[in-house]
Amino acid sequence: MSRPSLLAAALVLATGAAARADLTVAGTFRYVDRTFTFTGGFTGAEPTLPIRLATVQVIDDATSAVLATGATDENGAIALAVAGSGTKNLVVRCFSRSNQFGAQALRVTSAGNVEYSVSSATFAGWDLAADLDVGTVTAQKVLFGGFQGSPFNMLDQMVAGLQYAKSLGAANAPSSLRMIWPGGSGSFASGSTATMADDDGFDDVVQLHEFGHVMHNVYSDSDNPGGSHGFGESDQDPRLSFGEGYASFFAGAVQKFRGVANPGFYMDCSGTGATGAGSIQLRMRFEDGFPLTNTTGGEADEGAVFAALWDVVDTTATNDGIAGDDDALDGIPFANGASGDQVAWNVLVGPVDAAPNATIRDFWNGFFLPADAGNGSELKAAFEAWKMRFAADSTEPNDAPAAASPLTPAAAWSAIRTLYAPAAGQLGPGDGDADFYSFVLTAGTAFDVETRYPNGVADAQTYADPRVTLLRPNGSTFLTQDGGGTGRNALIAGAIADATGTWIARVDTASAFRKTGSYQLRVQVTAGPVAGCTAPVAASASFGAGKAGAGGTPTLQAVAAPVVGGTLTLALGGGPANAAGLLLVGTVAVDLPFDGGHLYVSPLALLPIAVGPSGSTSFGVALANPATCGLSVHTQLLFAADPGAAGFYQTSQSARLTLTFGG
Amino acid sequence: MLAPTRASFAAALALALLSGARATRSGAEASLVRGCKPAGPARIEITSLGFARGEATLQYSVTPTIAAARLATEVGAGSGSALLSHSEARGVDLAAGTTLAGSARVRLATGARAVEVAAVVEFAVADGTTEVQRAVLRLEVPGAAPEPELQAALSGGSTSLEVPAERSGGSRR
């Protein structure tokens, strides 16, 4: 009979405080595992592994009384002191539960919240004066609905995950953490519970992914909206991308922590017992994104998130399927000698916890605030490799009209720009960037302004949500557009410049959680001003004071600056309610006394006007190009029989409005 | 006490299942779900599904989420079931987001628990090779009973679900 080690004995929690320990019950609990590799799926090897830190009871099989409670050690071994005398029928039962992490348990249960157990043989009539070794008890695979699984394998993932977190300074979990199997057709996590699909009973990485969600929920705060998602999708909700990417990263980090041969990949295999490469349903390598390298990138791609975070923790010595390392971090210590794992955990439980609508951008910012973790340049390069461009672009600083970057209107797109501008000398954070671009237009020019995703890829590869604001040469706002283009991009199409000079396009974002990102911009002239009409924007002038009536003094004004080739909109007001008026239009201005007021236009046309209850109306007139060029048009509005107006004809009269189209 | 066996485990498991505790995500619970595992590289949607006279009849659509060099669809219901007909959704050189439709009729074996629709997606890898991955949608057969071995062992019962074990070594009387 083997004697328990002192270390194992320290794990003992004997029941019955006043009883003496008359025997020690020893033994080892193990479970059947299924081995898998990135290239081969389930290999067919089924080694046994220790059931670690699981709750164990010594039970009187005749009465079901619990004689002692303890736990397995890291090797699955037990050494429980049992008090008593005489003989009993002893059985030792190991549960899919761990009470070795404070007051809250880790539990693996059925959907009905029943824990699993595996038991020794029953040692009938055992003399309690003699120590008992129950030998090695190996939990076999559990078969359910054509699938295979092991609750003890799942418990081991939870134990490893919590040990990883505790190695980084985490406290014990504030609530019981639970994993359910078999859980039906899908694996998911909610709050402190992970549910594993019938099919995922031996998918360690999937189990750790779901447990990663649980840890994110319990130790930080996840804003993941949930929903179906997959690899190679780079236009996800960025909050989902972060939540899912972090969960997969967590799986890899735990695998690395526990020393598995190759920890650097996500894999989901068939749980039917199939083996070989054909058992692989889904896989992706953290280091290089294989097999979806080219379609992975951006802040809204869960694969890019876990690949970049993996670079934070892996080193040249990490056996992740790629020789060496593809990033400059390479295990170099961060500030204060912290490891990449430590920094990543600190960011999760600190800045990410505090952030509303957290995305990978909040994780990135956490590298710099509240304290700079160091290695900023290396982090920047690692994230940029996955198209998460948390860096100022080459046009910075261009954060004001006076610092605008010159842009030549053309069909070609700008280089890739970023909505990211950290303070001078800093690498982050850099939210709130607004990029200004300048370009010269002649009034009357028709033009488009638009943004697109980097390289125009359909699947975005950025989470950017650009907004464009156009400013006239005098600095006034011409138009703001937050959409209209492909996806979330901005498109201002068919605009006509109403001023000649240097225009400004301001690019920023109004999104609550797509606060940075990448884009390209272009300004295209689609129709230039017609030759000979060199000043197609009308100059506007008024003359005279008008004559009041029941609605006040009639008014006449152009809405916005009319442009040759565009539409002149005239707004008429100040008339009596529901009245009929006359609009005088001519090319010759006069100033003649009329009905106690003034006639200002020698009319070529008299346009009948009807106003509504408010005494106002408006209408539009197309300004032919170039026919309108060079004209000066004079207008005046009259209302006859206005009950509020003086004079024989009781006319109320507007001042004269003159529009001059240069040319 | 009965010796813990696979049968006793099965019995306890069956009791748990028959007690109505089977995991079904209610609307309220589903709304709390904050994460789930990544899906395979295709979305599978069932547009019509019926179970009658021991057969399952379904219509489905498959949409690859990445550019697919080849897409095939498999329908099955496990051992003993038979695929009676299958108008398979399949294609080559499909852009991401391309939706194909299919339909199938499956004779269900006694005790069949689920019908599975699997989209098998082959796609090009940057290194010039191809990769095959699968997206699987599992449709549980309404009213499916536990496996016969579970039903046969309902006499058990325990506060825990006993997992079958192999035992070696230890003390001998």
Image: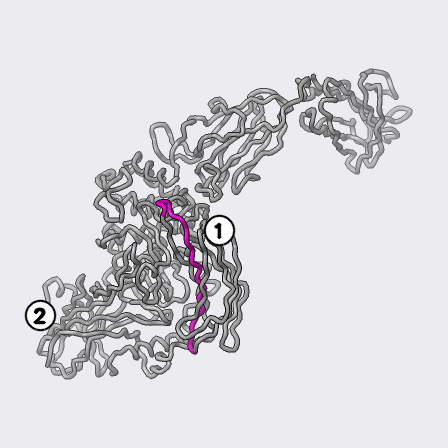
Q: Residue at x 26, y 75 (%)?
A: B164
| Location of mark 2 (residue) | A2
What is the magenta range? B110-128
- With respect to residue A395, does B42 lie above or below? below
**Of circles 2 and 1, which is in front?**
1
Q: Position of residue A395 (x, y in %)?
A: 43, 27
- Looking at this view, name the residue that lies furthest to the right: A648
Q: Position of residue A13 (x, y in %)?
A: 18, 68
Residue with the mark numbered 1: B94
On the picture, is A580 further left or further right than A110?
Answer: right
Image location (x, y in percent) of residue A445: 62, 25
Q: Report the residue at 39% width, 73% height from top.
A: B79
**Viewport quadrant of the N terminus of chain A:** bottom left
Give the residue drawn at x 81%, y 16%. A588
Marks 2/1: CA–CA distance: 64 Å
Assess whether residue B141 is covered by the magenta stretch: no
Tell me if A388 is positioned left or right of A102 in this view. right
- Name the quadrant containing residue A516: top left
**Residue A149 image point, x, y percent:** 31, 67
- The chain holding disc 1 is B
Visible residue check, residue A140: yes
The one nearer the camera, A284 or A71, is: A284
Q: Secondary structure at mark 1?
A: strand
